[in-house]
Amino acid sequence: QVQLVESGGGLVQAGGSLRLSCAASGRTLSSKGMGWFRQAAGKEREFVAAIGRSGAIVNYENSVKGRFTISRDNAKNTVYLQMNSLKPEDTAVYYCAAASGPSVYMQRAAYDYWGQGTQVTVSS
């Protein structure tokens, strides 16, 4: 069993930055691909970014490319999402997820474990 806890969300003005963290307990994350998803009010949960188990391979949703960076520290069992140049449309609850496999996955079905989410609000 893996427990994931996100932190680092908050209220920020457009153009600002936030760094989200996802700390895992229960089992090591080093063998698992990890992802970040987000869900805005009234919308489906959508893919944001994913990283393979070694950190060498990453993938991003098109609207966040060049602004967001996903990374991981397997020694700390933690995954990060650095978010720069934030826009009001980035406002959502952000979820961390751990996949059953080691690669990069965009589909929600590939992820077995989910955190409780952290709210990110970007004001204009």
Image (tube, rainbow, N blue to C red):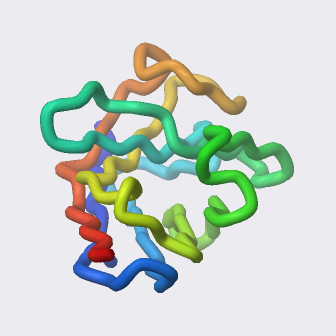
Compared across the picture, whether 52 is left or right of 124 comes to: right
Q: Residue furthest top?
A: 109
Q: Position of residue 6 (x, y in %)?
A: 30, 63
- Image spot of residue 92 (x, y percent): 27, 53
Residue extending farthest front: 124
- Residue drawn at x 53%, y 67% is 80
Identify the residue at image location x=42%, y=70%. 21
Q: Quadrant of residue 61?
A: top right
**Vertical side of 86 occupied by 94: above or below:** above
Q: Is residue 47 above or below residue 70?
A: above
Question: Is residue 75 found left or right of 107 in the rendered image?
Answer: right
Could you tell me if residue 96 is visible in this image? yes
- The residue nearer to you, when weighing 75 against 20, is 20
At a point 76% along the width and 54% down the height, the residue shown is 55
Q: State the image coordinates of residue 23 (x, y, percent, origin top left).
A: 38, 65
**Between residues 2 and 68, which one lies in front from this camera angle?**
68
Tell me: 86 left or right of 60. Answer: left
Name the image quarter holding residue 75: bottom right
Q: Quadrant of the N terminus?
A: top left
Left or right: residue 10 versus residue 68 is left
Q: Is residue 92 above or below residue 48?
A: below
Q: Is residue 71 visible?
A: no
- Position of residue 74 measured from the top left corner of the image (x, y, whole percent): 63, 63
Residue at 51% x, 24% y: name it.
100
> Quadrant of the rendered structure where residue 124 is?
bottom left
**So how many labels did they put on this image?**
0
